Amino acid sequence: MNPKKKITKIIKYKVVVKEKLLITLDQEKVITVKDLKKEFNGVDILNGISFVVALEEIYCILGPDGSGKTTLLEILVGLRNPSSGEVTILQNDISKSYEMREIKKRIGYLPQEFRTYDNLTVKENLQFWGKMYDKMLPVSEIIELFNLTDYANKRYRQLTFPIKRKVGLATAFINDPDIVFLDEPTSGLDQFAKKEIWGILKEFKARGKTIVLTTNQALEPAIVADQVAIIHKGLLKDIGTPLELIDRYSAGSRIIIRFISLTEREKAIKALQDECPFEIIDDNIVISSEEITLAEVLNKLEKVNARYSDIITQKPTLNDAFITLTGEKLSETI
Amino acid sequence: MDEQPILEEKEQPKAPSKFVLHLKRLARNFYLSMRRIFTLIGGRSLRYFRSPNVIFWSIIYPIVLVLIFGAIFGRAEFQTLNLDVVDQDHSEQSAYFMGLLENTTTLKINEITEPIISPEEWLKENNRFVLLIIPPTWGVKLSLNLTANLTIYYDPSSYSAKTVIDIVNEVVMDYNILIMPIELKFGMDVVYNYVANLSYIDSLVPGIIMIAISTITLFTSVNYDLEEKESNFLSKLATTPLTRFELVFSRQLWQLLLVFIASTLVILFALIFSFNISSLHPLMLLFIIFGTLTFSGIGFILVRLISNPDGIMIVSILFLVPQIILSGVIIPLLDFPQFLRALARIFPLYYLTEGIRYTMMGTFTGGFWLHFALSAIFAFIFQILGILAIKWRD
């Protein structure tokens, strides 16, 4: 498609979607979760979760495995019943079955580790999922949007894992939903595939879609999310934009020094111990840049002739905020 | 100028009534529901017909059975079904019983008047296969409401002897019902209408159809449903507007479609071996539906109880194989010890196989209706339990 035409189409589409939604939505709040609790076999999986998701937002639920992210998403899409609390989606109460039926028409969902029919082609699978809904986007359009043209007539089982994941993602958007729920959509993918998926998500956000996704990767929300909810052991720790959370909970940039041997590191420790507080993490010396400048550190190391292999300044990440909030560390790979 | 308002009124389209709008909504919902059901059937069918292994085991396998058994026994027409009877009782009851045997028209009754010292020797010497002895005082015992057994001698190597015994058993059962002190009215006439010149293939086909039904429905149900559950396919379906009814209905329709294809192929291949097509009866369809509902229900239950793919296959095989063996399709039930014959009667496949066999033979006796009723009960119970067992959301 001609890029100019595509942009015009997207803008028109966005206007239509927005108009349509604004008629029904109050203050653009598409999801409201109030004091949500889920107990299973006497264990609290979710404990008093409350948040609001606004229209056209990419809302990221960040937490390690077992924190309750998937359970929360499954409650939102109607797969599980909450023990208590209130959830409204597009102004419909999920606890009322007839209202849930209306919600189902307007949402898309990608479960974790999802597989569709192996022996059907990508096109056939998308047609299959589209026909489960009252309305669907043209399959050719969704194939183009997800860059699946080369695979359209290939059977699902012949595809590589990243392409399968993209097909799964396409099935979540096939019904032209207002809200899409994605459970760890980039899990197990390489950096190129992840970047492509983030690009697709941003494009759909531009089309007026609201996206709620879960992740256990600390860097992902910073790249893609408008709002991040940090969840840990069933508790909602905090909510904010990635920058707000980093500002709120991170101590600033860090200087990380890697040494060629432990003897060299010992020399450096002696030189720095009276100058500033530091930590030893993975055999490296980690210093907060608020305590000392990089130039001062280099000067101290030179004085004691401590030979290092690498020295870097690292900006604070969401992982730092997560560590401050929970005392645990998340994966930071891209 | 005066006419203008009238014109405007005419031009305005009349708003549809609430009833029309409601009807339109109903029609649209019905269309969407049907579209979802047929999309599910289409999806599963495409997946199925593109899997050579699955097609072999579910459709080709029963055909292979027909070809093997047909090649071995297909041309072997039954000899005339002779039944030699020694009436040592000469009572009214024995005469009435022999009359019932004669009425079957399939059996040729030869009354032996000469004294027989050793029935086994007599069978060998006279090259006969079945000998029925009505012992002295049999009629008196019956009239006194005492147990009075008949004795039957037969050559176990003769398949026609087993058919003769089957028919005699039917007559005994009906006669028992007639003379029972407690009135059991089934509301029907006892009519015997056995197909003349039955061949082995004619008695084999109903059994193979039932094996096909049980195998296809149980294994496809277990395989597909478990895979859909494990791959989160079912979870995703549960977040669409699809209803539980649509899901179950589409699965049943799809399995019925497979079962009808397999049954038709079995019958077509059996024609090669002179299968008597006139033995097909519309009531067969009911047994096919009962079988499908029974085994798909069992499949749903197994998927709920066992989540390990290997475990579920082993349990399915352990459940199905004894039923196939004890259904009397491949090995006549008479060849099994008494306890195994009793065991066969707890399995649904036994009643389904016997029922469909009676149907194809046109034998609508009390025995047939018993099998019919039990098959329907099994179908109803397992289907309800199966539907309740389907878990697609918390």
Image: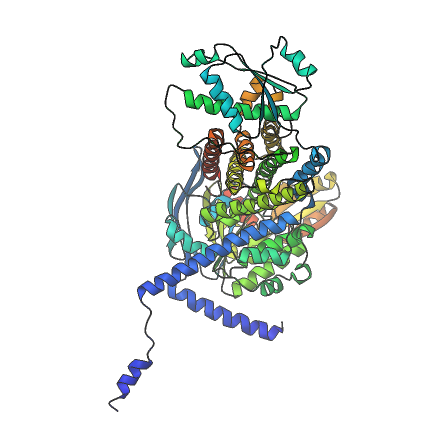
Nearest the viewer among B212 and B187 is B187
Q: Is residue A140 left or right of residue B10?
A: right
In which quadrant of the rendered image does the N terminus of chain B lie?
A: bottom left
In which quadrant of the rendered image does the C terminus of chain B lie?
A: top left
Task: Point out residue B140 in the picture as x, y percentages from the top left corner.
Answer: 44, 11
Nearest the viewer among B108 and B75 is B108
Against B125, residue A150 (above or below) is below
Q: Is residue A187 left or right of residue A46?
A: right
Q: Is residue A163 visible?
A: yes
Q: Is residue B197 left or right of residue B144?
A: right
Against B12, residue A212 (above or below) is above
Task: Point out residue B57 in the picture as x, y percentages from the top left corner.
Answer: 66, 39
Q: How is the image coloured?
A: rainbow
Give the residue at the far top of this rendering.
B117
Task: Point out residue A181 in the picture as x, y percentages from the top left corner.
Answer: 51, 53
| Residue at 68% across, 52% down | A159
Against B189, residue B253 (above or below) is below
Task: Point out residue B264 in the picture as x, y percentages from the top left corner.
Answer: 61, 45
Q: Is residue A25 visible?
A: no
Give the residue at the far left of this rendering.
B2
Give the residue at the far front of this rendering.
B113
